[in-house]
Amino acid sequence: VGGDSLLEKWFAAGDAGDLEAFDDFLHIDVVVHAPMGLSTEGREAEKAVWRDALRAMPDISHDIQEVVSVGSTIAARAVVTGTLQGNFAGISANGKSYDVDQGLFAHVRDDKIVEAWEIVDTASLLQQLGALPE
Amino acid sequence: MEETMSEHPNVTVINRMTEAALAGDKKVLAECFTEDMAFHVRGPLPRVGDHRGVEGFLGVIGLIGDLTAGDLKLDQQFAIADDGWAVEWERARFGRNGRTLDVHNAFIYRFEDGRIAEMWMIGAGPAGSESFFE
């Protein structure tokens, strides 16, 4: 499941619900910058966000399209899909599905991700979920 | 994410393209893009969707320039590349009608023979940014 890069392994494990595998890919003090109030500090906090995400969107999928890796930096583009079946990130469950582009950047130290940034097309996400203010 | 790397030729093309975009230099843009370059715009930006070629590209970038009356500041965080793909992360600050929008833009580029054949611009801003360019 997933490609060879740490980014691909991390998101493949997350989509599969194998959160304990994060121990192999994320530094214990990893910092993840994410939109919609989902930033985390520490591996366990990141697992908790994924646990909530999987509960709300059991079909969540990050289909990583391209990966560029140079030195200690990894970057990728992913297509994220899912269906909001439970409350998540302040949005109430509504059964709507989404399909958005995402840019991912990660900094690696000692073979694990120490900091990552998720740049998500939240404008489209909120529109597809009917969550934009009128 | 500070890191010293020798610049990949595709990063040189990206930086040349960005300068030309800001200058509206169609001749240089035509040298940087394949003739049918595909430009995918995502996020809280004007003309979200898919565009083609120099004219399609400038239709988006020119409109951003018009809507902000030139009040925009771009700050490249980093750009990395291999021979087929490149990724760039940029922070952008737009001013419009007394409002300011700070966004993170992820760019993913596919190259053919040293030219940009396809690019994604994924913008992510704070809550409410969706209406900034309306």
Image: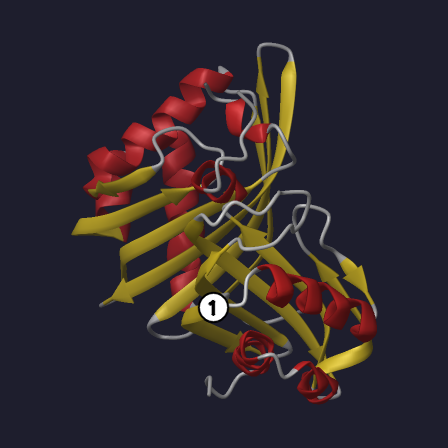
Numbered disc 1: secondary structure: strand
The total of numbered circles placed on residues is: 1
Q: Quarter-wise, where is residue B14 in the image?
A: bottom left
Residue B56 vs residue B35: left or right? right
Query: At 79% across and 74% down in the image, what residue appears?
Result: A43
Q: Quarter-wise, where is residue B3 in the image?
A: bottom right
Q: Please provide percent x and percent y for residue B89.
A: 55, 54
Query: At 51% across and 58% down in the image, what residue appears?
Result: A103
Q: Please provide percent x and percent y for residue A92.
A: 62, 43
Q: Please provide percent x and percent y for residue A116.
A: 67, 65
Residue B2 visible: no
Nearest the eye: A57 or B1: A57
Badge 1 is on which residue? A61
Q: How is the image coloured?
A: secondary structure
Residue A112 vs residue A122: left or right? right
Residue A25 vs residue A104: left or right? right
Amino acid type at circle 1 is Ser
Nearest the eye: A110 or A84: A84
Query: Badge 1, how many Cα within 10 Å: few under 14, some, many 20+?
Result: many
Query: At 61% across and 67% down in the image, what residue appears?
Result: A54
Where B112 sits versus A5, above or below?
Answer: above
Chain under disc 1 = A
Nearest the eye: A55 or A74: A55
Nearest the eye: B102 or A54: A54
Residue B70 vs residue A20: left or right? left
Residue B13 visible: yes
Query: At 37% across and 23% down in the image, what residue appears?
Result: B63
Residue furthest left as drawn: B35
Where B109 sits versus B35, above or below?
Answer: below
Where A111 sits versus A61, above or below?
Answer: below
